[in-house]
Amino acid sequence: MLIIKIARLLLVLIIYISISAPGFSQSKRTYTKGELYFSWGYNTEWYTRSNVHVKQPELGNKYSFNHIKGHDRRGWDNRLFKKPLTNPQYNYRLGYFFNPEKGWGFEINFDHTKFVFQDGQDVSLTGQLDGKPVDTTIHFSKENGFFYYLNNGANFLLFNIVKRHELYTSRNQKLKIDFLGKAGIGPVIPHVENSFFGNKNKPHFQLGGWNAGVEASLRATFLKYGYLEYANKLDYARYSHLKIYKGTAKHAFGTYEMILSIGGHIPIGKPLVHAQKS
C-alpha cells in the first residue's frame, strides 16, 4: 500500500541520517514563542472483533450480535485524485506548540475512519427477540436484510496533549526529524446506517459516545516549513444511543490505525532561543 511504501522510505531516511550523522542531532535549532501547524492525510485501519447491543422496546427486542468482524473502506487506493478529497478515509491535525523548546503542544486530532460489518459472515445472535429468548446464528448480509455501516464515518475526534522529541537537525535547519507522542480523549461523531431483519434506519450523523487514543509519529520537516508525517495510532471508541429502527444500539471496539500526512507549520513570534543539541 502507498502509506506503507512512503513510511518505509521515511524510516530509511532516518536510519541513514542516524548512521551518517554522529550523535544523531548535532546542530542548533531556532525556537520562537509558539508554533502553529496543520496537516492533511489519509489512513487505514484494523479493528478488534466487537459486539453490538440492540434495544427495541416497542418490538420486545433486546439482543446482541456477538464477535462481529469489521473492516475499513479506504477509498484513497482507487482513483484518489478523481474524486472529492473528503470521500476517502482522511485525517487532519491542527496543533500549537505553546513551548517549542521543550516540545509541549496541544492538538485537535480528527480521523474520518469507516467501520463496516463484513458482509457474508455468520454471526451469533443472543438475547430476546419478540419477547422470547433467542440463541441462534444469523447470516449477516445485505441480501438477507442485515447491514451495519459507519461508512460516512466512525469519526474519531480527539483533543491531544503533544510531546515532541528532536532527533536530528541539519546544519542549515532545512531538514529536521522529530518523534511525536500524543494522547487524548474526545467525542465520536458517527454516521449511522443499518438494517436489522430488513428494517432500515434513516441514515444520519450524531454525537454517539466517546473515544480515547494514543499516537506515535515520525515527522520529517523540509525547507523549514513543510513536513511529511507517518503515524501509528491505537484508539478505543464506545458508541451509545445509536439510532436504529424503533430503538437504539451501543457498540465498542479497538482500532489500530496507520496515517500518512503532509503539513506545514508557522512560527509565532521572533526567535527566542538558540539551543545546541548533542
Image (cartoon, grey):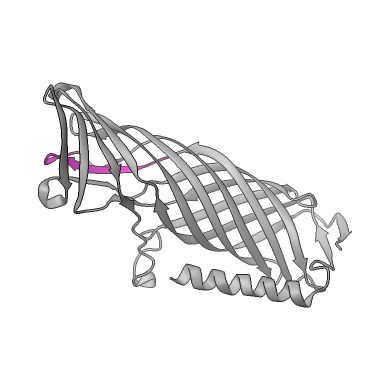
Res 173 → quadrant = bottom right
- The image quadrant where one finds the N terminus is bottom left
Q: Position of residue 225 (x, y in %)?
A: 68, 66
Q: Is residue 192 magenta?
A: yes
Residue appearing at x 25%, y 44% in the figure? 193
Residue appearing at x 56%, y 72% in the figure? 8
Residue appearing at x 80%, y 52% in the figure? 101
Q: Is residue 57 above or below residue 77?
A: above
Q: Is residue 224 left or right of residue 107?
A: right
Q: Position of residue 201 (x, y in %)?
A: 19, 38
**Magenta part of the chain:** 188-200
Q: Is residue 77 above or below residue 156?
A: below
The secondary structure that dominates the magenta segment is strand
Res 229 → quadrant = bottom right
Q: Is residue 74 magenta?
A: no
Q: Position of residue 242 (x, y in %)?
A: 30, 34
What is the tally of numbered marks visible in this picture? 0
Q: Is residue 5 left or right of residue 10?
A: left
- Can the viewer see residue 151 in this picture? no
- The image quadrant where one finds the C terminus is bottom right
- Can the viewer see residue 138 in this picture? yes
Q: Is residue 40 left or right of residue 152?
A: right
Residue appearing at x 18%, y 42% in the figure? 195
Q: Position of residue 48 (x, y in %)?
A: 39, 47
